[in-house]
Amino acid sequence: MTANGPFFPPTPEHDASARAGREQQFRRAREVLSGAGWLFDDFVNAEMRKVLVSKPDERDAREEAHRRARVATELKAGLESLIENYEADSALEAKRLERLQERRDRQNNKENRHGR
């Protein structure tokens, strides 16, 4: 029992749908960054230029431009992080499956040698 109620392990169907959802997020993030990643950089540069050339009495506009630049930077970093995490998880899963296959092959070889 967990703090939120009983624990039910994820079912294979849930696992598959969660995996498909993560894969779709990964593809979309990669598409956005490959097709329009430069827009984030240009937007941030334009907003920071506004901050730099603003007059001392334009405090509110300067703060708003800085906030917008920060949000765009964080959004791009979030997309990049999503991609990196997905790729790292995929590499780990591939290694895990490779080790599992090697273990099965060793077991099969052992069984074949012993005539089982």
Image (spheres, rainbow, N blue to C red):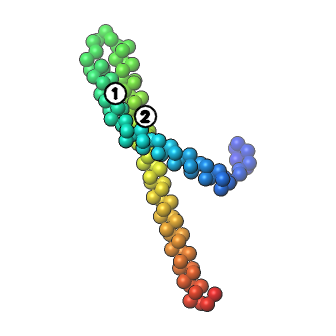
> How far from the left and from the top, in percent, is residue 45?
30, 28
- Residue 51 lies in quadrant: top left
User: Closer to the camera: disc 2 or disc 1?
Assistant: 1
Q: Nearer the viewer, residue 67 or 26?
A: 26
**In this view, 15 is above or below 40:** below
| Kind of residue at badge 2 | Leu
How many badges with numbers are in the image?
2
State the residue at coordinates (49%, 68%): 98
Residue projecting furthest to the top? 57
> How far from the left and from the top, in percent, is residue 82?
46, 44
Q: Is residue 16 visible?
A: yes
Q: For mark 2, what is the residue?
A: 75
State the residue at coordinates (51%, 48%): 23
> How far from the left and from the top, in percent, is residue 2?
70, 47
Left/right placement of residue 96 relative to residue 5 reads left
What is the C-alpha distance between the residues marked 2 and 1? 12 Å
Q: For mark 1, what is the residue?
A: 43
